[in-house]
Amino acid sequence: MEQQRLHPADDRQTGRIPESTSPPGLAQPLIAGVVTAVVGFSGAFAVVVSGLRAVGADQRQAVSGLLALCTAMGLLAIGLSTRHRQPISIAWSTPGAALLVATGRQPGGYAQAVGAFAVTGILLAVTGMWGRLGRWVTAIPAPLASAMLAGVLLPVCLTPVRAAVALPSLSLPAIVTWAVLTPFARRWATPAALVVAIGSLVVLRHPDLGSLAQLLPTATATRPALSTGAVIGIALPLYVVTMAAQNVPGIAVLNQFGYRPPTRSILVSTGAATALCAPFGGYALNLAAISAALAAGPDAGPDPKRRWIAATTAGATYLGLGLTAGLSAALLTAAPPLLIEAVAGLALLGTLGSALTASVADAEAREAAMIAFAVTASGISVLGIGSAFWGLVAGLGLHSLHGVRRTAARPRP
């Protein structure tokens, strides 16, 4: 009698994925890994560079940040995937980069932002070692966390509209390319829009990118400085956004495909790497969420036990893409800032839509979520602390008051 084969999700007690009956092959996981890295890099590196520049990094420091992030992402993906034999894709925090854009320069300059990056890494690592901190973060009502994220993303996502009016010859071809490709090839829409925007820039503006030696990426360290405003205004919101919008969904994606990701190992590794890379501009490393399905799903091959090869290939590709950091940053620096912000806004529109949907899904928390969204989107700064923190505080305050009212309204036994 033939033995019944289990679905991957049926073997979660061991954390292992049963092999498929299909013949093994390397082509699918290798191609899926390259696609994962190329889509992840080209679709969001403009947001990363914009975020680092917004908090005070010069071009050399932005190049260093891009190089440090790609290098750490590559090494972590290779190490974790090989060790655990699971498709563990590592990424930078794209919503976190949008948060940096919204937060802007700190009074003490880029050094204070670097200090906040290091604190974020420490918090991520501590979450992996101390489960209670993770439970506190997950205790934040999901609508409020989503509303805060939506408020962070909204100003960035409005820039394509502004760019279409201010820079029509440069931005409209990219916007049209994105709009045409989105219904048919969503994962390639933003990379294609970026290519068209750069092509328009080269044809119309003829930017001087400098010599080949100047385009080679170099690591530039900045001594971290700590301030209360940067820790509360950057580190804490960056930690919450990275956990809520990256790590938690990333774990859910792997669970969906039948894997049991080693959460402790992932959080400790990415947190420690973030803290180590912070002086070089590495603001936040985390489990991939958006691109995770490319390496963990059927596109990476019919055999779930061999899909770790896709994540490892993605890591190796990120190491190669890190070498283009100088050229990438030079092209972005040569472009009008509004054009780059417009491409970043196109990349984040889908995330904004998901965040807004999640923020209004619960009718009881809707008003508190909208307060969190409005305060965060306002861009205010009070006591040197950015709007993301105050939006979360305002939302939690109103949510608590509603909870008190509901408790008081319950009939007593």
Image (cartoon, rainbow, N blue to C red):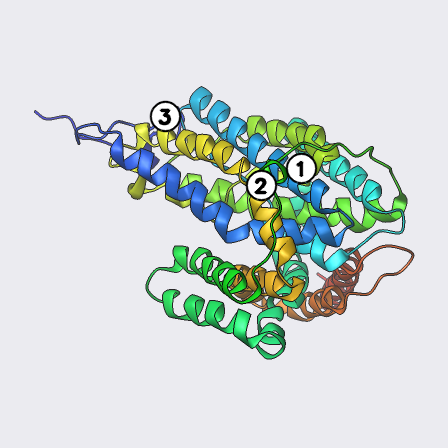
Query: Type of residue at label 3?
Result: Arg
Residue at horizontal 47 percent and vertical 44 percent from the top? 252
The numbered disc on residue 361 is none
The answer to whether marks 2 and 1 mark residues whose Cβ atoms lie closer than 8 Å is yes
Name the residue tied to disc 3: 16
Q: Secondary structure at mark 1?
A: helix
Residue 46 screen position, x and y as percent: 58, 53
* Residue 358 in view in this figure: no
Which mark sits nearer the N-terminus, 1 or 3?
Answer: 3
Query: Type of residue at label 2?
Result: Ala
Q: Nearer the viewer, mark 3 or mark 2?
A: 2
Q: For this rendering, which residue is in front, 173 or 130? A: 173
In the picture, which quadrant includes the C terminus?
bottom right
Name the residue tied to disc 1: 64
Q: For this rendering, which residue is in front, 125 or 194? A: 194
Which mark sits nearer the N-terminus, 2 or 1?
Answer: 1
Residue 225 screen position, x and y as percent: 86, 37
Residue 27 screen position, x and y as percent: 26, 33
C-alpha distance separating marks 2 and 1: 8 Å
* Residue 289 in view in this figure: yes
Q: Is residue 366 above or below residue 42?
A: below
Q: Secondary structure at mark 2?
A: helix
Within 10 Å of disc 3 (Cα), the crowding (few <14, some 14-19, many 20+) is some
Residue 186 screen position, x and y as percent: 39, 60
